[in-house]
């Protein structure tokens, strides 16, 4: 094999790993869960303790040395951690995603790195910061985000590519792109470096004694009496030297082999769950929890395929479709339908334009009245029941999993009366707006 062939194969492998086209679903869902977990985890963490720490304990790590960073005053730390939490929440829900993820990354570098300047360092926080930086550079807000819903709502015309909004260019649907692949692969690379480095470090410092000595059993016994883990499993394993050696050897092998997840689907299927179980086992036996890493494993889950499988199951359990009737000559009605389409992951809705397709609609649904459908959005459920206005939207909430948290609120005492009045006001306002721009008037 000549150098040219090797180069071509290397380039092909590089493209498969980093540039494989993908939909935005996986990246967007990972962003939502990752930042949601960070927001929940750091909501009650107070970083202002560093302002009162003795100056003699300050031993800055290289990043703080290079950037000449010190401990900020307590008031400044309080303000920074409030902004950090806000940025995490906004990053989670995907509101102003680019700015929010960048703010979370910048604040996270300082706040999460602060505790490592007092003598004890670890790679868990570093993995989180690297992941935040990767997401800040990516288009992770193109799915599962409020930004995405806003873009959908702004599409006021037909056509797959959307139409121009006043003062703006056309708003396109997300495309299949490598932009949604490389950020996930980059997180895999971060974890690979961490785990591979941990395996090399064990061998460099202890050699094979880390596997064949009583080091692991002593560690289990020591942690049991110091940290009091939830079970006595560690003590039981410590009484079986051969089992201790097997677990120690398996840990090193998985750590050293972990970079294979970058190029092999089989390796990802085996090594990522194995490493996850190892860290869970360490938490159970040693009461040392790698909390930061646990959330990073979500980047290995094929959420699009998992979601499709769940959708197929739900469709089998709840067959039938809802038919939605709307005024196709009203911009607000079109935006509402596009919003429903973006949330209709299970394909439970069929949309009919009552303004332009009434001949076909009346032939199939003779019980409907055209003027009523133009005045209020109507829906027919799989059982044939007709609902209009607020009642139709309340039925939509029951059919769309993402809206299930709103179902109890929509059925509270008085909710129907208030909802119908609000809908009536919006619908009447919608008619006046359509009349002003020359659209259909009812």
Image (cartoon, helix red, strand yellow):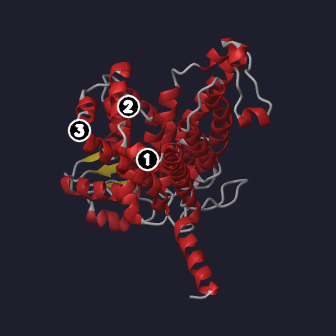
Q: Distance from label 3 to label 1 (Cα)?
A: 31 Å
Residue 190 in the image, given as x and y percentages of width and height = 56, 50
**Mark sitting earlier along the chain (3/1):** 3
**Left or right: where does residue 28 sit relative to residue 436?**
left
Q: Distance from label 2 to label 3 (Cα)?
A: 13 Å
* Residue found at x 71% / y 28%: 60
* Residue found at x 26% / y 44%: 242
Q: Tell me the tag on residue 297.
A: 1
Secondary structure found at label 1 = helix
**Mark sitting earlier along the chain (2/3):** 2
202 or 78, nearer to the observer: 202
> Is disc 3 surrounded by few (<14), some (14 to 19) or many (20+) residues within 10 Å?
few
Which one is closest to the eye, mark 1 or mark 2? 2
Q: Tell me the tag on residue 411.
A: none
Q: Quadrant of the N terminus?
A: bottom right
Residue 98 in the image, given as x and y percentages of width and height = 65, 45
Vertically, is 38 above or below 74? below
> Is disc 2 surrounded by few (<14), some (14 to 19) or many (20+) residues within 10 Å?
some
**Left or right: where does residue 57 sit relative to residue 36?**
right
* Residue found at x 30% / y 48%: 246
> Is disc 1 surrounded by few (<14), some (14 to 19) or many (20+) residues within 10 Å?
some
Which one is closest to the eye, mark 3 or mark 1? 3
User: Mark 2 near mark 3, Cβ–Cβ under 8 Å?
Assistant: no
Secondary structure found at label 2 = helix
Residue 432 in the image, given as x and y percentages of width and height = 57, 44
Residue bearing the label numbered 2: 219
**Left or right: where does residue 379 sit relative to residue 41?**
left
Secondary structure found at label 3 = loop
152 or 416, nearer to the observer: 152
Residue 397 in the image, given as x and y percentages of width and height = 34, 41
Q: Distance from label 1 to label 2 (Cα)?
A: 26 Å
Q: Tell me the tag on residue 240.
A: 3
């Amino acid at each position: 094999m000549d150098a040219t062939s090797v180069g071509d194969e290397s380039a092909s492998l590089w493209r498969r790993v980093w540039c494989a086209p993908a939909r935005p679903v996986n990246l967007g869902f990972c962003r939502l869960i990752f930042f949601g977990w960070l927001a929940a985890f750091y909501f009650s963490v107070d970083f202002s303790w560093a302002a009162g720490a003795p100056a003699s304990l300050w031993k800055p790590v290289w990043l703080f040395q290079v950037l000449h960073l010190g401990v900020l005053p307590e008031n400044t730390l309080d303000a920074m951690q409030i902004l950090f939490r806000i940025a995490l929440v906004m990053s989670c829900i995907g509101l102003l995603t680019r700015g929010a993820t960048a703010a979370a990354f910048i604040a996270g570098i300082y706040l999460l790195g602060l505790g490592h300047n007092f003598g004890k360092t670890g790679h868990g926080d570093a993995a989180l910061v690297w992941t935040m930086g990767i997401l800040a550079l990516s288009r992770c807000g193109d799915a599962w985000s409020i930004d995405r819903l806003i873009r959908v709502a702004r599409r006021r015309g037909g056509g797959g590519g959307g139409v121009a909004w006043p003062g703006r260019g056309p708003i396109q649907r997300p495309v299949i792109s490598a932009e949604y692949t490389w950020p996930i692969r980059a997180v895999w690379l971060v974890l690979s470096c961490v785990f591979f480095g941990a395996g090399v470090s064990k061998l460099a410092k202890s050699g094979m004694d880390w596997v064949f000595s009583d080091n692991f059993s002593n560690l289990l016994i020591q942690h049991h009496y110091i940290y009091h883990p939830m079970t006595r499993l560690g003590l039981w394993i410590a009484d079986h030297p051969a089992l201790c050696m097997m677990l120690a050897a398996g840990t090193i092998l998985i750590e050293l082999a972990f970079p294979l997840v970058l190029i092999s689907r089989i390796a990802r299927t085996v090594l990522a769950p194995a490493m996850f179980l190892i860290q869970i086992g360490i938490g159970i036996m040693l009461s040392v929890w790698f909390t930061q890493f646990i959330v990073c494993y979500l980047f290995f889950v094929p959420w699009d395929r998992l979601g499709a499988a769940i959708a197929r199951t739900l469709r089998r359990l709840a067959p039938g479709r809802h038919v939605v009737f709307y005024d196709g000559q009203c911009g607000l009605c079109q935006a509402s339908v596009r919003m429903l389409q973006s949330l209709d992951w299970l394909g439970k809705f069929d949309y009919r334009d009552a303004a332009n397709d009434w001949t076909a609609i009346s032939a199939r649904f003779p019980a409907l009245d055209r003027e009523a459908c133009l005045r209020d959005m109507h829906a027919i459920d799989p059982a044939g029941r007709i609902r209009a206005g607020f009642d139709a939207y309340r039925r939509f909430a029951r059919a769309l999993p993402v809206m299930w948290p709103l179902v109890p609120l929509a059925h509270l005492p008085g909710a129907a009366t208030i909802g119908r009045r609000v809908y009536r006001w919006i619908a009447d306002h919608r008619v006046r707006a359509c009349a002003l721009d020359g659209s259909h008037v009812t």
